[in-house]
Image: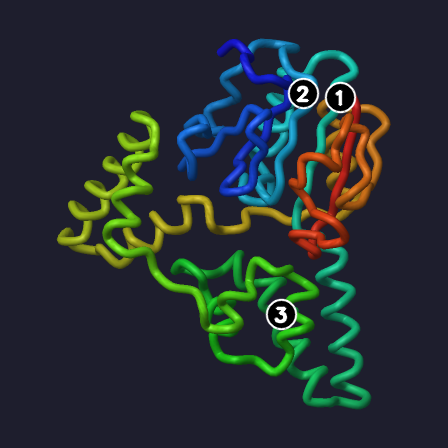
Amino acid sequence: MKVESKLKYLNVGCGKRFHQDWLNIDVLPADPGVIHCDVTKGLPFENESLKVVYHSHVLEHIPKSTAKTFMSECFRVLEPGGVIRIAVPDLEGIIRNYLRFLDQNIQNPTKESKENYEWMMLELYDQVVRDHSGGEMQVYLQSNPGNKSFVLSRLGEEVRPLLEGSSSKLSLSQKLKKFNSMSSSAKMFFVRSVLSSLIHKFLPGKKYYQVGKFRSEGEIHQWMYDQYSLKKLLEDVGFKEVHKVNAFESSIPEWSNFNLDGEGEVVFKPDSLFMEGIK
């Protein structure tokens, strides 16, 4: 695929957060301007055709056995001197918070420390072991927990609707509008998935099929990274000058104009580890 965006910048697995001047790809596009792409089959771009490759909370959903292949694809499509920028849940931050509240609960427990410990256990395990969408995290968020401010400090404003009980399912007309906005390839992918689910719903062993299907569809965390292991992965595929950054600092020109990791002083995913490297 030839690069025809205003900028030769690629956002992989963009979801609903993207900039219109970038090339934006996702397996289930949330907007007509987003290109349908299954990154497990590679990146459909020519060698050395991009200046920037960025992905946020994507890498942890890729099995460790294929993570190096995926990152090699990111390296391949970047031109020499191009920038890779990655955001993932920070395993180190999760574990340090878990240990902090574990120690407090052993030595001098409080209502707050107990609630925060329970939440950190969910951050550590739930998205790895869950067998249905949302898992125990969603149950917790919708239970009117007493530590809302702590949860918001971890996950950001994106979870406020769940915490405040203001989230709602899409109406039929909204679902149809969303479907009609998809590209032809995305519609085909969606229809095949629905038909497959309906067929297997009535087969023997349907429960095992449904759990297996869910766990292979992308919501599960397949691996977790800290600043050491992520830096090593980037260096192993050839990136240089790999270093940790924050949501607002970047080697990407005019990064602050794109509002992908934060806006103003608000970090969209505060639990993130941000890292960049150069090809």
Q: Residues within 10 Å of mark 2 (few under 14, many from 20)?
A: many
120, above or below 87, in the image: below
Name which residue lies at 68% across and 44% down: 261
Measured as percent of width and height from the top left, residue 163 is found at 53, 71
> What SS does tag 3 mark?
helix
Q: In the drawing, what numbered circle is on residue 238?
A: 1
Measured as percent of width and height from the top left, residue 136 is found at 48, 69
| Front label number (1 vs 2) | 2
Name which residue lies at 46% across and 73% down: 165
CB under 8 Å between callouts 2 and 3? no
> What SS does tag 2 mark?
helix
Q: Which residue is mark 2?
A: 75
Snapshot quadrant of residue 194:
top left
Classify residue 267 as left or right of residue 220. right
Name which residue lies at 38% across and 63% down: 168
Give how far apart the Cα atoms at labels 1 and 2 are.
7 Å
Q: Residues within 10 Å of mark 3 (few under 14, many from 20)?
A: some
Q: Which residue is mark 3?
A: 121
Q: Amino acid under label 1?
A: Gly
CB under 8 Å between callouts 3 and 1? no
Classify residue 170 as left or right of residue 121. left
Q: Amino acid under label 2?
A: Phe
Can I make out residue 268 in this image? Answer: yes
Q: Residues within 10 Å of mark 1 (few under 14, many from 20)?
A: some
Measured as percent of width and height from the top left, residue 116 is found at 67, 76
Measured as percent of width and height from the top left, residue 34 is found at 46, 30
40, above or below 155, in the image: above
Which callout, 2 or 3, points at the residue further toward the start of the chain?
2
